[in-house]
Amino acid sequence: MYITDDIRYVGVNDHQLDLFEGQYVIPNGMAYNSYLIVDDQIAVMDSVDKNFTDVWLQNIRAETGDRPVDYLIVQHMEPDHSGSLATFMNVYPKAVVVASAKAFAMMQAFFGEDYAERRRIVTEGDKLTLGRHTLSFVSAPMIHWPEVIMTYDEAEKVFFSADAFGKFGALDVEEDWACEARRYYFGIVGKYGAQVQALLKKAAKLEINKICPLHGPVLSENLSDYLNLYDIWSSYRVESEGVAIACASIYGNTMEAAKLLKEELLARGCKKVALSDLARDDMAEAIEDAFRYGKLVLACSTYNGDVFPFMRTFIEGLTERNYQSRTVALMENGSWAPNAAKVMRAMLEKSKNLTFAENSVKIASALSDSSRAQIAALADELMKS
């Protein structure tokens, strides 16, 4: 696949893996992107997961024939992108590895080799000329590993963005970009909003025609839309009007209350209510919804004087990603010693700029006239706020 006349796609699709990073469900697979720049000298941008080394090398040979590859540029050392590096260096014995200093330390740890005789260390603003193409390197630490560099091709105005602007899903499956890019962002990059903001400031100084991420499709149209979404996500602003309800229910009564709240909100004209069953639904999607919308309702049963474990996992997933600047409402269920609301609030106490709803819901085992009235009052408040 040609990105431009000189830049070709040599990555692979993975439909074998069920969990990305051992935790994220990927029903439509995953793409491990690698790119080839053909000029007076040839550079390969990143490798792929070790399970696809042979396919990747075949893709490279199909574009280069008998020509040697001069450089392997390593932007990110996570194994899904560096897994084939050592084999590549054996196949192309004259190739030079281009990476940050921290990346070479990781190569020593991963492969027992830091390629001291075949390496070029680069940092912010360094350049590599291939002929017509001059590559300028952008330091991007903690997006989302400390060694990350990104690369700007001055000739074609192509930005190779490492894991930024990536998404779940293989490239041979068509699906909405924003949904899986949002789930990917908040799952993997979301903790590092400040670092993404710093990157966006650097990117704003570049004239970019195409963005080539390490996962997901090449972005070439309406780039301002993608940049705007990344700006919203990384500054923790509200993307869409609506309410996310995250529910952890033991016997179903708490879920019944959560469903009633959803009905009450929709009846009052709420544009979107996303209800997640934390025990059964994809936790990453529930976290995505919590960041997407401006209002979050936590509905949970008391369990061993604490919260039902799925709720604890969910809230920890929010706080470790710097959840902030939202309205939060609490619903608790407890047959004899309700304590879930107190625990949930305490878990969120270090989160910035949270506003807790004045109305809360207390359920004693099952819904009653009193708890139904509390749900109606909470729906009224959420709609007014």
Image (spheres, rainbow, N blue to C red):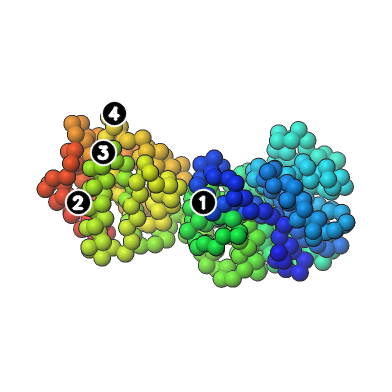
* Amino acid carrying mark 2 in the image: Ile
Residue 351 in percent (x, y) is at: 39, 44
* Amino acid carrying mark 1 in the image: Pro
Disc 3 to disc 1, C-alpha distance: 29 Å
The residue where tag 4 is placed is: 304
Judge from the rendering whether residue 260 lies leftward or rightward of residue 164; answer left or right.
Answer: left
> Which of disc 4 and disc 1 is earlier in sequence?
1
The residue where tag 2 is placed is: 375
Q: Which callout, 1 or 4, points to the residue nearer the camera? A: 1
Helix, strand or loop under label 1: loop
| Residue occupying the far bottom of the picture | 222
Disc 1 to disc 2, C-alpha distance: 35 Å
Residue 243 in percent (x, y) is at: 32, 56
Which residue is at a point 63% across and 63% down the rendered structure image? 218
* Amino acid carrying mark 3 in the image: Tyr
Disc 2 to disc 3, C-alpha distance: 19 Å
Query: Does residue 138 appear in this view?
Result: no
Q: Give the numbered dot on residue 251.
A: 3
Task: Give the camera-side residue of 151 and 70.
Answer: 70
Helix, strand or loop under label 2: helix
Res 17 quadrant in image:
top right
The residue where tag 1 is placed is: 27
Judge from the rendering whether residue 74 lies leftward or rightward of residue 296; answer left or right.
Answer: right
* Amino acid carrying mark 4 in the image: Asn
